[in-house]
Image (cartoon, rainbow, N blue to C red):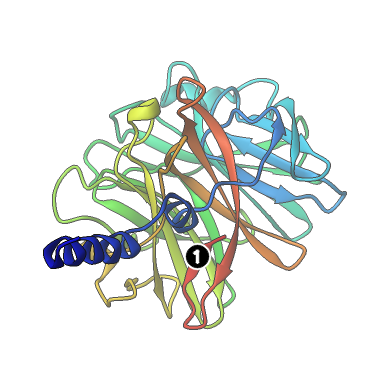
């Protein structure tokens, strides 16, 4: 073997050692928890019920419902509502609600959701309550907040957070990104004349940041959002990013200090292997641990949207990561 051959072999071996292996790549974006039963879902919101077991609501049907005893095997449980409330038809002739958000406060469950049509910001967010959180037990309370074609935002994808004794709702989509308004904690609806705060966007149209979810951890609030394109099966490019702020109303920045109002955001999870277009996320707490719920498009099942669940852990410097 010549010296040149030896050096080439050494250089090649060194380069190969520096390149990520398949296993290393898989560790960068961990696979979701293995699930059984009815996994088909889109834009999931998940909670552990006080009566026991788990519920997941989602886009599809009249707010599609899934139930689970252990968080691993899921059964189809019909819909949140038996019939769509009449006011939905003002915003969608099929009365097709999107992207619900489930929370619990003041002794009852609150279910927020959006009604709109594809490509329009003539949209509204509604709210319903239930004593148990189970499908078929919801009472609708009508419109919370709306947007019109003259507005620069879109009232879809609601998510609720409580901060310093006040109740807030983040929402938003391609119409200049993520916004926030204050809610009346008694009615659960927007405070009349409430300021519309701007939390996140991207420098250029179509902006492509939506589906916010805010959680408190330590002394910071963390804004999770879905970036890029959903709803195209295996051609979807959805990914989840995050920024944080000392205040629920922002400003939110990523770990480099780039504002989310200027396109910033640390990558939390993106498509890998069979799990394409990860997004439509929410966060729930179970037995003292945080979990990230989202949908992905299954490349091994013709791009069918399915439920993804990953543990959400926190680094020493306070940034979330999936495990």
Dot 1: few (<14), some (14–19), or many (≥20) neighbours within 10 Å? Answer: some
Give x and y (percent) for residue 285.
Answer: 68, 61
In this view, the residue in front, 62 or 257, is: 257
Picture quadrant of residue 162:
bottom right
Q: Where the N terminus falls, by quadrant? A: bottom left
Asked if residue 69 lies left or right of residue 34, the reply is: right
Picture quadrant of residue 72:
top right
Q: What residue sits right under mark 1 in the picture?
A: 321
Asked if residue 127 lies left or right of residue 221, the reply is: right
Q: Residue at x 83, y 41 (%)?
A: 69
How many labels were placed on the picture? Answer: 1
- Looking at the image, which residue sits at the far right? 51
Give x and y (percent) for residue 112.
Answer: 57, 44
- Looking at the image, which residue sits at the far front? 1
Give x and y (percent) for residue 12.
Answer: 24, 60
Above or below: residue 255 compared with residue 29: below
């Amino acid at each position: 073997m010549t010296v040149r051959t030896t050096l080439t072999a050494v250089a090649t071996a060194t380069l190969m050692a520096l390149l990520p292996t398949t296993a290393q790549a898989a560790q960068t974006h961990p696979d979701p928890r293995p699930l059984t039963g009815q996994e088909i879902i889109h834009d999931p919101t998940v909670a552990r019920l006080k009566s026991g077991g788990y519920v997941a609501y989602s886009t599809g049907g009249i707010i599609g419902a899934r139930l689970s005893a252990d968080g691993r095997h899921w059964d189809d449980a019909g819909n949140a509502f038996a019939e769509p409330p009449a006011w939905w038809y003002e915003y969608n002739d099929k009365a097709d609600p999107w992207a619900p958000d489930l929370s619990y406060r003041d002794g009852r469950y609150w279910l927020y959701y959006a009604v709109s049509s594809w490509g329009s910001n003539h949209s509204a967010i509604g709210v319903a309550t239930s004593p148990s959180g189970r499908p078929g037990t919801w009472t609708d309370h009508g419109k919370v907040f709306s947007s019109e074609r003259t507005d620069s935002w879109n009232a879809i994808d609601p998510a609720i957070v409580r901060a310093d004794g006040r109740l807030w709702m983040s929402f938003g989509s391609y119409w200049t990104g993520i916004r926030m308004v204050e809610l009346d904690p008694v009615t659960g609806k927007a405070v009349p004349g409430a300021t519309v705060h701007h939390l996140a966007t991207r420098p250029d149209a179509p902006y492509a940041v939506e589906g916010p979810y805010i959680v408190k951890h330590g002394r910071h609030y963390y804004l999770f959002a879905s970036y890029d394109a959903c709803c195209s099966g295996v051609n979807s490019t959805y990914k989840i990013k995050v920024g944080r702020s000392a205040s629920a109303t922002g400003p939110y920045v990523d770990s480099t200090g780039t504002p989310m109002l200027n396109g910033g955001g640390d990558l939390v999870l993106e498509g890998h292997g069979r799990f394409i277009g990860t997004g439509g996320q929410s966060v729930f707490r179970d037995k003292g641990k945080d979990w990230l719920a989202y949908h992905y498009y299954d490349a091994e099942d013709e791009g069918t949207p399915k439920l993804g669940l990953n543990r959400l852990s926190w680094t020493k410097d306070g940034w979330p990561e999936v495990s």
